[in-house]
Image (cartoon, rainbow, N blue to C red):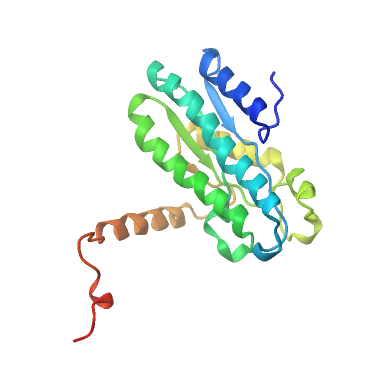
Amino acid sequence: MLQADLTNAADLTALETRLRDDAQIGILINNAGMAQSGGFLEQSTEAIERLIALNVVALTRLAAAVAPRFAESGTGSIVNLGSVVGFAPEFGMTVYGATKAFVLYLSQGMHLELAPKGVYIQAVLPAATRTEIWERAGIDLNTLSEVMDVEELVDAALVGFDRRELVTIPPLHVASRWDSLDGARQGLLSDIRQAKAAERYQPQA
């Protein structure tokens, strides 16, 4: 076991080295992260920097450290912990949600690149889960109407892992809603015309 503070440059570098060199490591579970209370205008520069350093920079660097070895061997799994907040700006956790939107996008991009090489990528998107992350962020769990126990989250994530899902959303009870959202995204892409602005943006004669 290697303990590390992933916001510490030396610790992060040591863990990257371990992931690159230790062939016995076949799964990376990228679950280090933190939340943050308060709105966008209330957050200090230092708090924002620390949040992004852990939720975005460290997560990406660890995945980047191990991915080449997995791709070369044709096996391995990377599980990235995101959040449903990543597609819900209405929840009022602007910077935190943005970091989790990044995790989803990163996972989708990694899947497109690495799945053909035999590497499995999973993005797990929980909602409020009963962990210490909330207390550290100064958020009282008792103010939330529904909170999932961490054991239930883990069990659900493992089901998604066994099914080789790219995106696992344990609190989403109608799976077709995610399929519809992703389908709408792909439909939007099919309507992009890069060389010319849409008619609604053309100057009026």
Query: Considering the image in quadrants, where does the C terminus appear?
Result: bottom left
Figure check: 145 above or below 130: below
Please state which of residues 6 and 72 is positioned toward the viewer in this rendering: 6
Could you tell me which residue is drawn at 52 percent across and 57 percent down? 87
Would residue 172 be visible to someone looking at this image?
A: no
Could you tell me which residue is drawn at 58 percent across and 18 percent down? 18
Query: Considering the image in quadrants, where does the N terminus appear?
Result: top right
Please state which of residues 48 and 130 is positioned toward the viewer in this rendering: 48
Residue 3 in the image: x percent, y percent? 72, 24
Instruction: Give left or right: position of 181 versus 135.
Output: left
Figure check: 49 above or below 20: below
Could you tell me which residue is drawn at 60 percent across and 47 percent down? 126
Instruction: Give left or right: position of 15 versus 193.
Output: right
Would residue 2 be visible to someone looking at this image?
A: yes
Figure check: 185 above or below 131: below
Please state which of residues 38 and 128 is positioned toward the viewer in this rendering: 38
Instruction: Give left or right: position of 59 versus 176.
Output: right
Q: Quadrant of residue 89?
A: bottom right
Figure check: 60 above or below 66: below
Please state which of residues 193 and 8 is positioned toward the viewer in this rendering: 8
Residue 13 in the image: x percent, y percent? 60, 25
Q: How many marks?
A: 0
Q: In the displayed orientation, state which residue is furthest to the bottom.
A: 205
Instruction: Give left or right: position of 94 versus 178.
Output: right
Residue 83 in the image: x percent, y percent? 58, 49
